Structure formats: structure tokens, C-alpha cells
Image: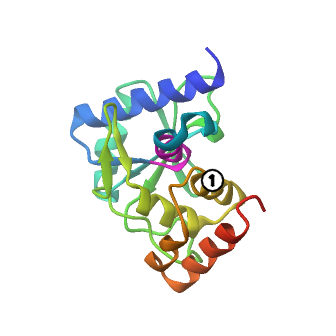
Amino acid sequence: MNAHDKVRARLALATQALADSGVRYAVAGGNAVQHHVARADETQIRGTRDVDILIDRADFEAVKRSLESKGFRYRHVAGIDVFLDGAESKVGDAVHILYAGEKVRDHELAANPGVDEIEQTEDFRVLALEPLVRIKLTAYRRKDQVHLQDMIRVGLIDPSWVSRFTPELGHRLQILIDDPDG
């Protein structure tokens, strides 16, 4: 099984476990970007190593029970909650938990969206495009900028999106729209 297949299997196992237990969640991060980009042009999707899942903090214990029942092992590392899926699993390729309505880092400009800002796919609940863009603009690390550039390049985001966000986040988006290959 190659790395891409391992991530897809991890995503499928985790989301099925959460769905079976009735926990509200949303797939976020690179897997959510893949989903949206693939709708526009599947040849443009980019790989990702981990699985980011957005949940309500109040549901953490239910999430933990659900994922552990499928063989995931919980760890709290560097301020984040992760679930490893095997003896060889690393934190960088684990299931990472994000909390709805909370900031990942104190200095960030916006909190994470809610778990109901989703689209239901055939396989899982995924963060809708606008809240996903907001998360990416908030984190604004290089990989987030690349994800945003991918979404701009396939036509999911255009200049009309700038006004949907706070001035600070809108400015970040405008920079990327002005130079999508920068």
C-alpha cells in the first residue's frame, strides 16, 4: 500500500468510526482541499500525509472511544490531540483533532468553524468550501497558502471571495489572487 492509499484508508476508517458512533465531525485540512479541488479538476489534487478532523470539544471522549475501538492510539503531543493508527505510525501522519469554535494558536485571526458547516459526501462529512478557505487563511502557513493557490488555480476561489472575510483575511486572499503562483 502506498502513502496515498494509507492516508485514504486512515481517513475512511476514522470517519466511518465517527459516523457509526453518531459523533458530529468534519474532515478538514488537506483531505478537504483534495475533495473540493477534485470536483473542479481531479488532475490537480495534491497529496497529504495526515487526516484533520474537526469536532466539538464536548465530544472528545466519544471520539476517543470511537477511534480507539478501531485500533487508533491516542496521544497528546506538542499541544495537539492525535490518534496513531499503527506501531509504525508517526504524529505527522496521524489523525489530528481540531476543535470547532476554537483557535489552533492564540495569535490566529479567527477561530475554527463549527462542525455543521459541512457538505455530506458519499463517504464522509467534509468542511464546506468557505469555512475551509477561512481556516486556510487563518493558519496561513506555506502549505495553507499552497492549498489556497490550488483552489484559486482550479477556479474555486476568485476575487469576489475577498469581501467574504474580515479585512485581514481578505487581504491575505487578495495577495494570493494577485500572484497565484507566488
Callout 1 amino acid: Arg
User: Was residue 45 drawn as part of the magenta stretch in this picture?
Assistant: no
Residue 95 is at least partly visible in this image: no
Can residue 31 be found in the magenta stretch? Answer: yes
Whether residue 135 is situated above or below residue 45 in the rendered picture: below
Magenta part of the chain: 28-37
Q: Is residue 66 above or below residue 26?
A: above
**Residue found at the very far bottom of the displayed protein:** 167
Residue appearing at x 33%, y 48% in the figure: 25
Where does the image place residue 174, in percent across and percent down from the top left? 62, 75
Left or right: 179 with respect to 113? right
Quarter occupied by residue 22: top left
Q: Residue at x 43, y 68 (%)?
A: 102
Q: Is residue 139 above or below residue 52?
A: below
Kindly identify the residue that appears in the image at 32 percent across and 38 percent down.
Answer: 121
Residue nearest the viewer, comparing 12 with 37: 37
Q: Secondary structure at mark 1?
A: helix
Relative image position of residue 39 (x, y in whole percent): 46, 41
Say which quadrant the N terminus sits in. Answer: top right
Can you say which quadrant of the picture contains the C terminus?
bottom right
Q: Nearer the viewer, residue 60 or 142?
A: 142
